[in-house]
Amino acid sequence: MASPIKMIAVDIDGTLLPSVGTVVSERNCCALRDAEAAGMELVIATGRRQAYGAPLIHPVGLKPETTVMITSNGTVTRTLAGEAIDRFFLPVETARGLCPALRPFGTTVFTFDREGPGELVLESLDNLRGRIALWVEANRAAILEVRPLERAFDQGEAPVQGMVCGGVEEMRRAEEWLAASPVASQVEMHRTEYPTRDLTILDILPPGCSKGTALRRLAEGRGIGRGEILAIGDNWNDLEMLEFAGNRAVMANGAPDLVELARERGWTIAAGNDEDGVAQIVESVLAGSRVSRW
């Protein structure tokens, strides 16, 4: 007999949000509120930092004190209200060494767990605007330009996340290069691919960090088993979370290779993000249906 779902972990971009815009649909909002009312714990798991993700989630109407946000792809965990749960850092010397190593691949951005200008530090805004202009404009107040980037660590503060972005093939080469480099044992890498835009975001995190490991720590702390967890995502940075959960669904609009992997493993393929796929899955769970297990 399937265990009842006690925790639902949901990605934001490409999953909870539509393809265009930053407003969660009313159907998705209602489904998540209904799940909360039924006693399920809600976890929002995203590559965004909390200050960039929380404003999208507050209007959903979930309880801020009990809703959990796993942010920066698993390095920081807080409640939606901001109460600290978990946090991990890239060592300063590791981050400093990444600056020259990543420079040939494009503009590197480091995320610091602080508020205001300097949450995001990079060398040049101009190099990013052409590829992720909307991200730049949405985060402009938090961005600080530092040249050379190595100087961002002069005060000894450690970041929670590094990121470099570029074309899909370019970033796959960057990931392969880093995986074969001496720094590989000092970091964890996760990529988020958008093939139709020829865009990949390659996140560089402290060793062992992922949405999956953050979800595991959270669940263990609450006494919730894998079979009682449902995870919903759309991209490669969701893979560890999907693999950890005993119940999982991959969005039909997700990264094509991930959707194919999900089919091979017999995972549920949810309707696309523009068809309220999250709501459809959550509604089916509330109605007593099973989500595919692996």
Image (spheres, rainbow, N blue to C red):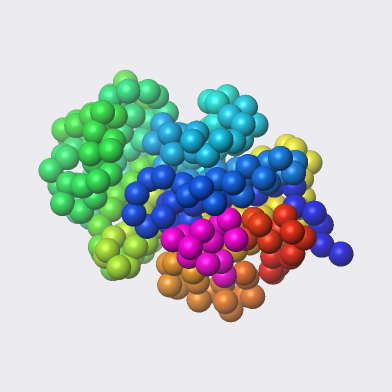
**Residue 77 percent coordinates (x, y):** 55, 35
Answer whether residue 64 is visible to the viewer in this image: yes
Magenta stretch holds residue 119? no
Q: Residue furthest left?
A: 126
Of residue 146 and residue 253, the one placed in the foreground of this image is 253
> Depth check: 259 or 181 in front?
259
| Residue drawn where x is 56% and y is 35% of the image | 61
Residue 248 in the image: state x and y as whole percent: 63, 61
Residue 236 horizontal side relative to residue 280, left or right: left
**Quadrant showing the C terminus:** bottom right
On the image, which quarter does residue 99 sit in?
A: top left
Residue 2 lies in quadrant? bottom right
- Please, is residue 157 above or below residue 195 in the view? above
Can residue 212 be seen here? The reply is: no
Question: In this orientation, which residue lies closer to the viewer: 164 or 290?
Answer: 290
Q: Is residue 145 above or below residue 218?
A: above
Q: Residue at x 46, y 60 (%)?
A: 273
Snapshot quadrant of residue 56: top left
Q: Quarter of the image containing the N terminus?
A: bottom right
The residue sitting at the bottom extreme is 264
Q: Position of residue 194 (x, y in %)?
A: 34, 63
Count of numbered marks: 0
The residue at the point 55 percent across, 31 percent down is 80
Left or right, 80 with respect to 288, comes to left
Kindly give the residue lying farthest to the top in the view shown. Answer: 155
Is residue 270 located in the magenta-colored stretch of the structure?
yes
Residue 69 in the image, given as x and y percentages of width and height: 55, 38
From which residue to which does the magenta span run? 269-280
